[in-house]
Image (tube, rainbow, N blue to C red):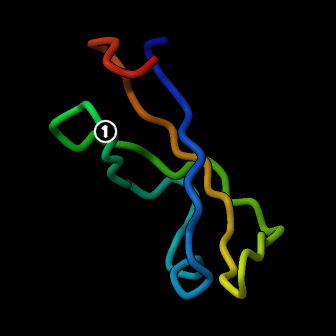
Amino acid sequence: LGEMEVRAAVDQADIAKLEKGMPASVTVPGVRVPLDATVFDIWLSPTVTQTVVTYDVILRVKNPDGKLL
């Protein structure tokens, strides 16, 4: 559990700005500080929910304190 993966839904307007390996930040309810992350993978199959198009992005987050489960 020293490194975790987070799947985030990214709006189609922002997906073109992302690249694998770029830094990111993750905010998790219950953890008061943002966690540093890295873009690991970008899934190019969109999800459409009520006309909103999003893409799944996999982020890798270091978890040395075990705050994420």
Identify the residue at horizontal 55%, vertical 88% (top origin): 13
Q: Can you tell which quarter of the image residue 37 is in?
A: top left
Where residue 30 appears, as percent x and y from the top left, is 26, 31
Image coordinates for residue 51, horizontal then vertical, percent: 72, 88
Pointer 1: what residue?
29
Indicate whether 54 appears above or below 51: above
Structural crowding at the residue carrying mark 1, measured as other residues with C-alpha within 10 Å and reported as few (<14), some (14–19) or many (≥20): few
* Residue 61: quarter of image: top left
Image location of residue 6, percent across then percent down: 54, 40
Q: Is residue 3 above or below residue 36?
A: above
Count of numbered circles on the image: 1
Q: Which residue: 51% across, 26% down? A: 4
Q: Is residue 27 left or right of residue 22?
A: left
Return the residue found at the far left.
32
x, y (%) of residue 54? Answer: 66, 73
Please report the residue visible at 58 percent of the width from the left and 76 percent of the height from the top: 15
